[in-house]
Image: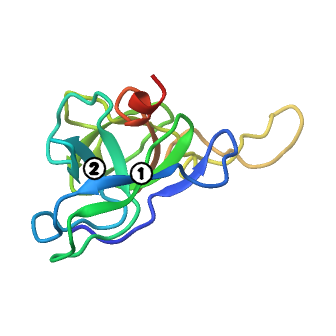
Amino acid sequence: MASNKVAWVGNLDGACEPLVILGLFQAGATAAIKRGEILELSGGNWIPLDADQSMAGVIAIANEEIKSGDRAGYYGIIIPRPGDIFEFELAAASAVAVGTALYWSTSQKLTVTAGTNVVGRGVGQEHYPQHQGHLADDASGDAGTTVRTTSYVRMTFTKAASYYAVLVQ
């Protein structure tokens, strides 16, 4: 079930806030949308992403909730830029390494196991083992090489999938 969640967590290049612009939405009764929902541009309107489709300049993130019954109009959307980091739930817990391809699964969820069109790539290292000590220099314990399984992934969207590709042509 979709929930209101701030999906943007930072930027690899140091930007302090996401790129937010206004996007056109249908009336809320037609498509209620939660904050943090992955969106696609369809027929000139932003709607929840609903399929594993060719990701060509059509992806954005809802920056506010549009409730059932809200008016059609312009509401805030986040345009994923190169380096923007987002956090989403995984459809199934997985040990996601940096660079792992991510695919759309369902509302506000991604998967590493299925899909044709890559939405983005994993960038988070919060679930990596600690930095390994050099055996000749210190006697600290072995940090190991196992990347832990996690239910959430930090990721960047591909530039080709993001609406950003349309804005900077």
Residue appearing at x 41%, y 62% in the figure: 63
Residue appearing at x 19%, y 27% in the figure: 116
Specify whether 109 is left or right of 13.
left
Q: Name which of mark 1 and mark 2 comes first in the sequence.
A: 2
The amino acid on which the numbered mark 2 sits, given as a three-letter code, is Leu
Which color mode does the image show? rainbow
* Residue on which the image places disc 2: 39
Residue 141 image offset from top left, x and y in percent: 73, 49
Quarter of the figure with residue 132: top right
Specify whether 51 is left or right of 25.
left
User: Closer to the camera, 164 or 95?
Assistant: 164
**Label at residue 60:** none
Determine whether the residue tagged by mark 2 lies in a helix, strand or loop.
strand
Residue 168 image offset from top left, x and y in percent: 48, 27
Q: Is residue 19 above or below residue 26?
A: above
Residue 38 image offset from top left, x and y in percent: 30, 51
Number of the front mark, 1 or 2: 2
Residue appearing at x 26%, y 62% in the figure: 73
* Residue on which the image places disc 1: 149
Residue lying furthest left = 30
Residue appearing at x 34%, y 32% in the figure: 161
User: Closer to the camera, 62 or 50?
Assistant: 62
C-alpha span from label 1 to label 2: 27 Å
Quarter of the figure with residue 48: bottom left
Q: Is residue 107 above or below residue 103?
A: below
Residue 133 image offset from top left, x and y in percent: 78, 40
The number of numbered discs placed on residues in the rendered structure image is: 2
User: Closer to the camera, 29 or 102?
Assistant: 29
Residue lying furthest top = 169
The amino acid on which the numbered mark 1 sits, given as a three-letter code, is Thr
**Crowding at mark 2 (Cα within 10 Å: few <14, some 14-19, many 20+):** many
Q: Is residue 125 above or below residue 115?
A: below
